[in-house]
Amino acid sequence: MSGVLLIERLLRRCSSHTSLPVNDSEERKIRFYKVQHERDTIVMLFSLFLIFVGAAVFATGALYARQSLIIGYIILGVVLGPDVLGWIKDAELIKDISNIGIIFLLFLLGLHLSPNKLLELLKQTTFVTLLSSGSFALTGWAISMLAGFDFTNAVVIGVACMFSSTIIGLKLLPTTVLHHRHTGEVIISVLLFQDLIAIAVLIVFQAASSEQSVMLEMGKLVVLFPVLIGITWVLKNYVLMKLFFKYDRIQEYVFLLTLAWCLGISEMAYAMGFSHETGAFIAGITVATSPIAVFISESLKPLRDFFLVLFFFALGAGLRLGELDGIWLPAIGLGLAMLLMKPIVFRFALRKVSETNRLGWETGFRLGQMSEFSLLIVFVALNSALIDSSTVYFVQLATLVTFIGSSYSVVLRYPTPVAVSERLRRD
């Protein structure tokens, strides 16, 4: 029996248990919403069943084939998504839920960096980030123009090529590298600088569809950013740490307080005009020097991985195969160009700032993909009526190609937590 037929049978059973009276209209409304709620619950639970059972099966196959687990999750999304089996109808809902995993990822990233160390790293990699981002944007624009896109669409595609994936970069970075090696520090600082550029780009695109000027929106953020940091610092010193030190032996309470801190600061940042991810990073970095930071980091990792499985699944499920006619070949070409170019450019830029050749190549391969910000940027540009829908699908496919190719090359070449080789497996 197919998944769709099973869901339909469950929904019919749900409806049969709840007959709607004809006379009492209020009761009919209540019964109707109850039935609708039960149906939504059944569909969501069945979707989660398919995703995680399927993820286990595909992950097993990926390990036997010596592939990255991430590739298995993405392929599973394509197979179960609307354009193949069609068992998962609402991929966007899954993707919205999975974004919590990105918030936790940035929060954990902040936990491992002190504010002083962050400023030092950003100063060191400013040249590297600006040079590499400009090179990738120019290459993406040129390939898009050759593929037949007009100037505006090509510019947006070029901008989408500027960034590397925070999720792939950090997910495949072992804890030993992340905490104790200079390679991890360089990768983190480049990703953070790229995230700041991405936020500025999003502001420009969003302002393009509103009546307010870009400079006004940027000015607001320049003023509000210190306010956000100040409020976070006050809450951390006079509320959070006092509660931590008073009840630090109750692990369940510490876990709940950590979740509240991460998601609370994320929501406050969003209310001020920043991204949830920016707020989560600030929430993490403010408690990085706390002695409880290590416990927080370890306790949140399983929760982070749960949502990241949903994220990679949603990427595959969101790909509309029927919309790729005429653009799939240049999109794959763009993805392959980024995979080839990014390691070379990062190696060249890092050598210019006196980093070693080995570090340059490793950083380049670990950051050799497009980004989840690439997808967000084209969606915002589409909503602002700056680009065509075909541009969104073009960037989606190119991004997936880089995700698959980059994770594959890193898993086979460098130490990762999900390496198929015992020699390269690090946690």
Image: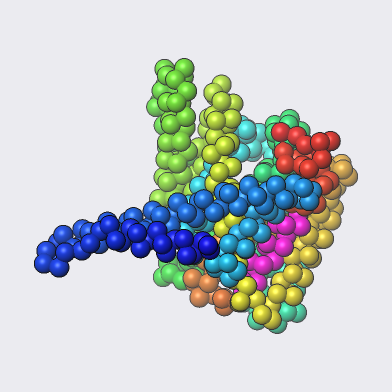
Q: Nearer the viewer, residue 67 or 156?
A: 67
Residue 237 lies in what quarter of the image? top left
For this orientation, the residue located farthest to the front is 1
Instruction: Specify whether residue 360 is painted magenta.
Output: no
- Which residue is depicted at the point 65% across and 50% down? 57
The image shows residue 315 at horizontal and vertical percentages of 60, 59
Q: Would residue 243 be seen by someone viewing this image from the given angle? A: yes
Instruction: Specify whether residue 396 is painted magenta.
Output: yes
- Which residue is depicted at the point 76% across and 62% down? 338
In which quadrant is the C terminus drawn? top right
Left or right: 92 in relation to 352: left
The image shows residue 139 at horizontal and vertical percentages of 76, 68
Give the magenta-colored segment's residue range: 391-406
Considering the whole magenta stretch, tell me its main secondary structure: helix
For this orientation, the residue located farthest to the right is 357
- Which residue is depicted at the point 45% across and 51% down? 45
When the figure is inspected, residue 189 is found, relative to residue 201, above or below; the finding is above
The image shows residue 183 at horizontal and vertical percentages of 77, 39
Q: Would residue 274 be seen by someone viewing this image from the given angle? A: no
Q: Nearer the viewer, residue 45 or 395?
A: 45
- Which residue is depicted at the point 46% across and 60% down? 6
Left or right: 315 in relation to 331: left
The image shows residue 7 at horizontal and vertical percentages of 44, 61
